[in-house]
Image: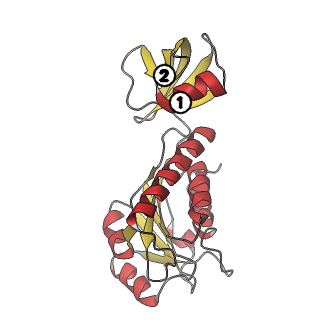
Amino acid sequence: MAWFFANGTITTEYYTITGEDASHIARSLRMKIGEELTLCTPDGRRHECEITGITGNGAPTEVAVRIMRSIECEQEPDVRVSLYIALMKGDKIDDVVQKAVELGAYEITPFLSARCISRPDEKSMQKKFARWQKIADNAASQSRRGVIPRVNPCISLRDIPKAAADADTSVVFYECGGRKLTELIGGKPKAVALITGAEGGFEQEEIDFLQDHGVQVATLGRRILRAQTAPIAALCAVMLLTGNLE
């Protein structure tokens, strides 16, 4: 069944889909009146819908649906994992965003650290954010997520402790070693923050700063992972340890 996201909560029996989703339903999928689709809302509910009308041969297109039944969306993990990923060269973050959304990340926040090679100007950064959020939107639909994860504005490494203040556990993965993740992720945490570095890793002063602000230092094993591999490996490990890959 086709999978889409509503802009807000649905409180009536009927809803109108507009914008790119409506065009995709009508033109790309060529769906017809009477066919069914799924709409997810930010309140964590999934709505099974029947198409009752399609209007607009050109732009804008609108698709009217009737809500047949609504249930809690079971696709979302029971732990909110916030990924903090250092800026990387080229389009490496594109793949990280896509895979992280598929695996269940709650939000993704790029940050600047001392060894980041990529330092785009404001105009370039805005274009990158628009592309990353679009990738997140598409990945959420493809993997049938209950919500669309946010790609947050870029911050500095020193802003991470404040941004991750609500996490039960915050972990930075250091190429020079640290504790085993199995020692740090126990029980059923509600929120976890994971921090991974750029191509050149972290400077010791940065690790010291994060530790001084309550962040645990961990390892991802004896091998050195690429900057774009580390966040996905860390996310997979946390999802497995919390029972969200079963």
User: How far across and how far down the image is residue 151, in percent?
Assistant: 45, 54
Q: Nearer the viewer, mark 2 or mark 1?
A: 1
**Which quadrant holds the N terminus?**
top right
Q: CA gap, disc 2 to disc 1?
A: 20 Å
Above or below residue 50? Residue 158 is below
Residue at the spot of label 2: 70
Above or below residue 14? Residue 140 is below
Question: Foreground residue, 167 or 136?
Answer: 136
SS at badge 1 = helix
Question: Foreground residue, 225 or 71?
Answer: 225
Q: Which residue in the rendered view is the most extreme toward the right?
A: 223
Image mark for residue 243: none
Residue type, mark 1 in image:
Asp
Q: Is residue 220 left or right of residue 69?
A: right
**Residue at the spot 62% in from the left edge and 55% down from the top edge:** 99
Above or below residue 166? Residue 52 is above
